[in-house]
Amino acid sequence: MDYRGRFAPSPTGPLHAGSLVAALASWLDARAHGGQWLVRIEDVDLPRCPPGTDTLILEQLARCSLVPDEPPSWQSRRSALYEAALARLLAAGQAYGCACTRRQIAARAGPRARNGELVYPGTCRAGTQGREPRAWRLRTDNELLRWTDRRLGPQSQRVEDEVGDFVLLRADGLWAYQLAVVVDDAEQDITDVVRGEDLADNTPRQIRLQAALGLPTPRYLHTPLVLGENGEKLSKQNGAQALDLTDPAAALGRAAEALGLSVSGNTVGDVLASAVLAWPNASWTKA
């Protein structure tokens, strides 16, 4: 299959410097492989997405000449695809309803928590005992998943031990990120996922879900993170400032430098052309 990549921002706020690094990396990888680059607005959690932020993000990308090869898509308009996927999983016995509250999960999970999230103890695997399901979960197993990241190298994880049966449809009726991204990547024929290293931990859950749905697994490349002065990852959650595009060429130059690329040029076009030439020579993008 021909290369198809994507940039999938969540419109909870405007792009910041770290977002531009991720966008540029995915665009460069697509161009280096002579492939297509898509933009998908991941607004599945609509209550957290201020109106108009999606349009602002697309405008920010356009100012940097990062224009998708196909019209952008929105997760909030794709619910029918997620419903069909959940129905398939339920019919195959791969998913089940869960009646647990967060407090009940915490009581059973005890100290089993990672990255601030509780490891689900499998309470409702055998049924909800007459209680009404609040959420729907994917049934994991004890399989050791192995994959190779194009930058981070060989990786492995037992999802059951590290995460547990994870949520597909939340108690508030919103689709979970893991289900939406897996269904979208497959439906859009994405062959390569290039994103920030902070999302690397999602990969084993997505591979497990791809297997359950009989979907192909893309290649993964997780890029270096942009850190703030406090040493923490730049993010909307910790107050990262909106991207300053007074000089788009300079902003792109800084994003390229964060990726370890040496670029030149005073215009957006020149910087992007220079970055395209530099990308294949980055030691961690050989694969």
Image (cartoon, rainbow, N blue to C red):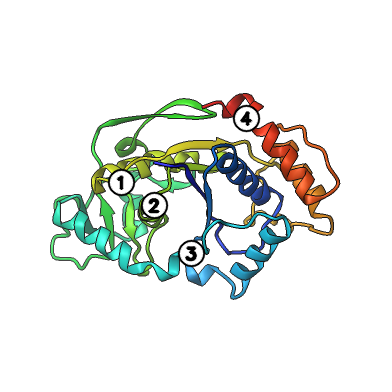
Q: Which mark is residue 178?
A: 2
Nearer to us: label 2 or label 3 = 3
Q: Which residue is mark 1?
A: 209
Q: Is residue 195 above or below residue 90?
A: above
First in residue order: circle 4 vs circle 2: 2
Image position, residue 192 (x, y; %): 47, 41
Q: Nearer the viewer, residue 3 or 78?
A: 3
Q: Regarding mark 3 in the picture, which secondary structure is present there?
A: strand
Q: Quadrant of residue 218?
A: top left
Asked if the residues shown at circle 1 and circle 2 are in contact, with their CB atoms under 8 angstroms apart, the answer is yes
* Amino acid type at image mark 3: Ser
First in residue order: circle 1 vs circle 2: 2
Nearer to us: label 3 or label 4 = 4
Q: Which residue is mark 4?
A: 280
Q: Tell me the CA gap for discs 4 and 2.
A: 30 Å
Q: Is residue 247 above or below residue 145?
A: below
* Amino acid type at image mark 4: Pro
* Amino acid type at image mark 1: Leu
* Residue depicted at x 25% and y 59%: 86
Residue pushed farthest bottom?
Answer: 51
* Amino acid type at image mark 2: Gln
* Residue depicted at x 36% and y 57%: 103
Q: Which residue is mark 3?
A: 73
Q: Tell me the CA gap for discs 3 and 4.
A: 28 Å
